[in-house]
Amino acid sequence: MDIGAVIIGDELLSGKRQDKHLGFLIDTLTPRGLELRWVRMVGDHPQHLLETFRQTLATEAVVFCFGGIGATPDDLTRSTLAQAAGLPLQRHPEAQALLEARFGEAAYPHRIRMAHLPVGATLIPNPVNQVPGFSLQQHHCVPGFPNMAWPMVEWVLDTHYMHLYTSPDTEMLFTVQGAAESDLIPLMEALTAHFPQLRLSSLPSGERGRFLEIGLKGPEPTLLPACEQLRAGLQAQSLSFSEQPRIPTARSTPET
């Protein structure tokens, strides 16, 4: 399944804030056997957001959108996603009820804007302050605040996509000492030819005491013989190396 992310906010592009959602999403998808395929970071600019959503809606991707669903003028996710989908905004009765229950009379005249959603949108519950996110055509829009957004994303995955969960792929990392990446290209090409279902990565270091990190990722029954072939190839070139499995560390939801 093609899964992408749209991370929204001028504050990220200006450097005022650092994005935390990308790492969270990767670490959340991996143990479920899912994989993030692409990410876009877009400022609070209506034309850029509109063009982004036109492109993502034209695919079958599941898209997680972070930020831009508040009530201020720079919160443009609802309006631009609706426009890209060719849909009007209308007040969602369940969202309206949640906002009224949360804020009372103070929901009007401004906070109620957060209940104006594209026609056909469904709600994503917010466990922190009950102000919901929303889903439209496999686009799932949540706040920019990690303490709210992250459990909402997990709810979407466990509610709508659990049937797609699989055993996560295994990844083995080989750290090769004193190796030039170009010298190992034939070995890496042979691996990708013999094991096309595996993902190979190569990450050289330019630091003193040069080393190269080669990663192999895929189903364990295929990974094991591929690792044997890589070991044999490295040993044939009298290269010193170490190996270890890569185990992603789950990220806890921030308190604030």
Image: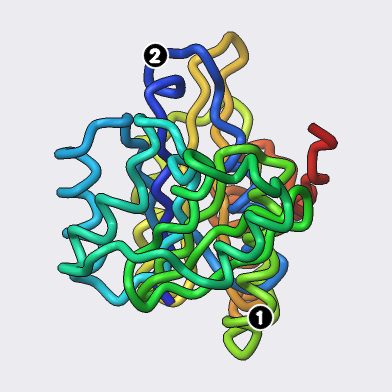
Res 60 → quadrant: bottom left
Can residue 75 be seen?
yes
The CA distance from mark 2 to mark 1 is: 35 Å
For residue 37, side relative to residue 153 (left or right): left
Residue assigned mark 2? 14
Quarter of the figure with the N terminus:
bottom left
Residue at 77% across, 54% down: 247
Res. 191 visible in picture = no
Q: Based on the displayed image, in which of its 4 quarters is residue 207 positioned?
A: top right
Element on which disc 2 rests: helix
Circle count? 2
Q: Regarding mark 1 in the picture, which secondary structure is present there? A: helix
Which image quarter: residue 9?
top left
Q: Earlier in the sequence, mark 2 or mark 1?
A: 2
Q: Residues within 10 Å of mark 2 (few under 14, many from 20)?
A: few
Residue underneath mark 1? 159
Above or below, 216 against 204 in this view is below
Could you classify mark 1 by the number of other residues whose Cα lies within 10 Å: few (under 14), some (14-19), or many (20 or more)?
Answer: few
Q: Amino acid at mark 1?
A: Thr
Say the numbered circle drawn on residue 29: none
Which residue is located at x 24 percent, y 31 percent? 45
Looking at the picture, the colour scheme in use is rainbow
Q: Residue furthest front?
A: 105
User: Which residue is rendered at x = 68% and y = 36% of the image?
Assistant: 240
Residue type at numbered disc 2: Ser
